[in-house]
Image (tube, rainbow, N blue to C red):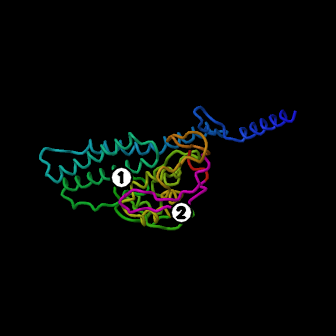
Amino acid sequence: MDLLLIALLIGAVVMLMRSMRPHQAVGGRPAKRQLPGAEHNKELAERRWAAVRRIAEEDVTQLGQQIAATPVTDSLEPEAAQDFDDALNAYERAKEALEVSTHPDDLQWVTRSIDDGRFALAKLEARRTGRELPNRRPPCFFDQRHGLSVADAQWAPPEGALRDVPVCAACDARIKDGLDPQARMVETAQGQRPYYDAGPEYAPYMRGWYAASGLYMMNNILLGTMLLNAMYFPPGYDYFGGEGGEGADGGDAGDAGDAGGDAGGDMGGDMGGGDFGGGDFGGFGDFGF
């Protein structure tokens, strides 16, 4: 009788220990925990990724159209011919980077190549018209499709501090006339908003345009915007949420309202603006889609 009680006690202990272990999937590996609402969060992540990728695609298309519309003759001087080749090569790099992109981090290589291509076209146009070659300047902050900036203008976002931002001639004139510059608007869950106020997933897209201008410029123009902290997220950071269902980039899409967490570490890579260190930036809240 005592042996039977001991056997029953051992069996109960074994069952209790098994119930306390993580659920095991086939092959003995822990099954991925599926939180309530994970499918909804996955959809949100995919929509947000599609939105930021779409504006990069529009920029690649515009560069291709600019190249196609550029008059080219067989009598181009060697320097002008090289400018045209540089623009074509930059366009091809941008297309290839876009085709393989699966994560916001990948878009910095797209926009950097587009910027190279636009500068090559600006030099070609100067040679064709006999004007002085342009200096390498960052594109207009408000809408990079406006082209190279021509000056720095003082501007402040709503309830923000004044700072110098690179502007095209049209945006410079609007600011001097007391008008709002024509910012690039993108779709978000809250409606259309300027791209720099649409969500942290736009940070790598912007990094490609301005990293070559240096960390100081990016810190200055983004002062008071949600993209400033996002500039320092480590490579592969999940811009679309925390834990949960599979995201659009193959990682955790999680709760779309929580883009926070420990974003410390080295942003990595030489983007022409130096080595960007990390930090601890958490709790962004719900941005964009």
Q: Which residue is mark 1?
A: 112
Q: Is residue 281 magenta?
A: yes
Amino acid carrying mark 1 in the image:
Arg
34 or 112: nearer the viewer: 34
Q: Which dot, 1 or 2, sits closer to the camera? A: 1
Q: Residues within 10 Å of mark 2 (few under 14, many from 20)?
A: some
Identify the image quadrant of residue 74: top left
Q: Is residue 213 magenta?
A: no
Residue sitting at x 42%, y 65%: 217
Quadrant of the rendering where the N terminus is positioned? top right
Q: Earlier in the sequence, mark 1 or mark 2?
A: 1
Looking at the image, residue 265 sits to the left or right of residue 145; the answer is: right
Looking at the image, residue 99 sits to the left or right of residue 256; the answer is: left
Element marked by disc 2: loop
Q: Is residue 180 positioned above or below 250 on the image?
A: below
Q: Which residue is mark 2?
A: 224
19 or 104: nearer the viewer: 19
Distance in Å between CA atoms under marks 1 and 2: 24 Å
Looking at the image, residue 25 sits to the left or right of residue 152; the answer is: right
Identify the image quadrant of residue 66: top left
Q: The magenta stretch spans which residues?
A: 256-284
Q: Residues within 10 Å of mark 1 (few under 14, many from 20)?
A: many
281 or 122: nearer the viewer: 281
Amino acid carrying mark 2 in the image:
Gly
Element marked by disc 1: helix
Quadrant of the rendering where the C terminus is positioned? top right
Q: Is residue 249 positioned above or below 233 on the image?
A: above
Residue sitting at x 22%, y 56%: 126
18 or 83: nearer the viewer: 18
Please tell me whether the stretch drawn in magenta is mainly helix, strand or loop.
loop
